[in-house]
Image (cartoon, rainbow, N blue to C red):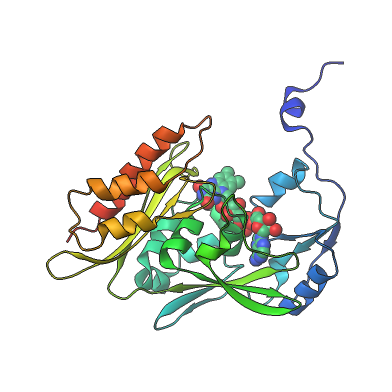
Amino acid sequence: MPRCPAALTLGTVKPPAFDYRAPRTVDETVRLLSGANGATTLLAGGQSLLPLLNRRRVRPVTLVDLGGVEGLDTVTLEERAVRIGALVRLRALETHAALRDTLPVLHETVRLVAYPQIRTRATFGGSLCHADPAAELPALALALGARLRLRSAAGQRTVDAEEFYRPGGGTALLPGELLTEAELPLHEGHRFRFAEVPRLGQGGFPLVGACAGVSLDPEGTVISARLSAAGAADRPLRLHAAERALTGRALSGLGSVLDAAAHEADPPSDTYGSADYRRALLRTTLRRALEGMRP
Ligand SMILES: Cc1cc2nc3c(=O)[nH]c(=O)nc-3n(C[C@H](O)[C@H](O)[C@H](O)COP(=O)(O)OP(=O)(O)OC[C@H]3O[C@@H](n4cnc5c(N)ncnc54)[C@H](O)[C@@H]3O)c2cc1C
């Protein structure tokens, strides 16, 4: 009997059987997580998890659906920071007028993620926790110095985005932990921009993206710089050497800054492009993000 080519490519397209739980509170959620010996998987918007389940790359004993958990879908604007609940949908961030005025780079970056249909389901917390090295929002979280609140049955801890994304990939989430909120500091006097080259045209994951934030003195000299990259390593990458190269100079003749960024990147080679090509794209995207901020 001939085999269906799609079945050969995808293996199977039905998830294995699992127990489904839909808690209403964070306390109930962490209780479910704590009793499960790591065999529980959290479901947020499902835009990354459901394909993995259908292909049986993930085989949870219990799936805990965060969709009905109260208190995780709020956006709070404070004087020095914006707090975003883990379950806030990307589309809600995109259409939040006050947030757009307060933190324009978030609006600009969210609009680069996937398509409106995906953004209607995908959540801010899901994007941060899925930790795709090429995803836009983890790179943005790094440049902004986001602080991530993690809850478990043992209590709450706060982890800086840079500590959250581990060398080699993955996150600092421990078994039984849930991301509840991200706090994005508002860096007074800084402007941020995000630039990317998508893999497959508008709406696709970036092949490489760069986020840049700078504050300038009245002469146009960089006082402080916060730079990060997507698709440039095995994790979202803060570009410390490029930040040092940029500080104390103008936003022109950026060759040494771009050299520093390309040097600290360690991008993969795959069917979308070689490591050298990605390094070249990092130079291009970082230049675009920085030049977009010239006075
Ligand atoms: C066609 C398509 C195009 C896409 N294009 C892009 C793109 O251009 N850029 C981009 O960045 N992304 C893109 N995505 C990915 C999409 O943005 C992600 O699916 C989304 O970011 C993950 O969020 P989610 O809410 O769907 O998470 P889910 O898929 O529900 O979960 C993802 C992972 O995070 C874990 N998780 C979720 N929430 C929490 C939490 N609160 N605490 C702890 N763990 C949690 C889950 O257990 C799971 O392991 C695309 C997806 C599709 C299907």
**Is 261 above or below relative to 190?**
above
Residue 26: x percent and y percent?
72, 76
Q: Is residue 142 left or right of residue 260?
A: right
Residue 250 left/right relative to 132: left
**In which quadrant of the rendered image does the N terminus lie?**
top right
State how many labels appear: 0
Q: Nearer the viewer, residue 254 or 101?
A: 254
Residue situated furthest top in the rendering: 1
Residue furthest left in the image: 219
Residue 76, x across and y down, in percent: 49, 79
Evaluate whether residue 117 shows in this view. no
Q: Is residue 272 visible?
A: yes
| 78 relative to 88, above or below | below
Determine the residue positioned at 53% across, 51% down: 235
Nearer to the camera, 82 or 168: 168
Which quarter holds ligand 1?
bottom right
Residue 111 or 59: which is nearer the viewer?
59
Residue 268 at x, y percent in the picture: 51, 38
Give coordinates of residue 16: x percent, y percent.
Answer: 85, 46
Looking at the picture, tell me which residue is in the foreground, 124 or 116: 124
Q: Which quarter of the image is occupied by the C terminus?
A: bottom left
**Apparent side of residue 42 relative to residue 267 in the rendered image (left or right):** right
| Left/right of residue 135 with respect to residue 30 in the rendered view | left
Q: Residue at x 42, y 66 (%)?
A: 144
Q: Vertical placement of 126 versus 30: above or below?
A: above
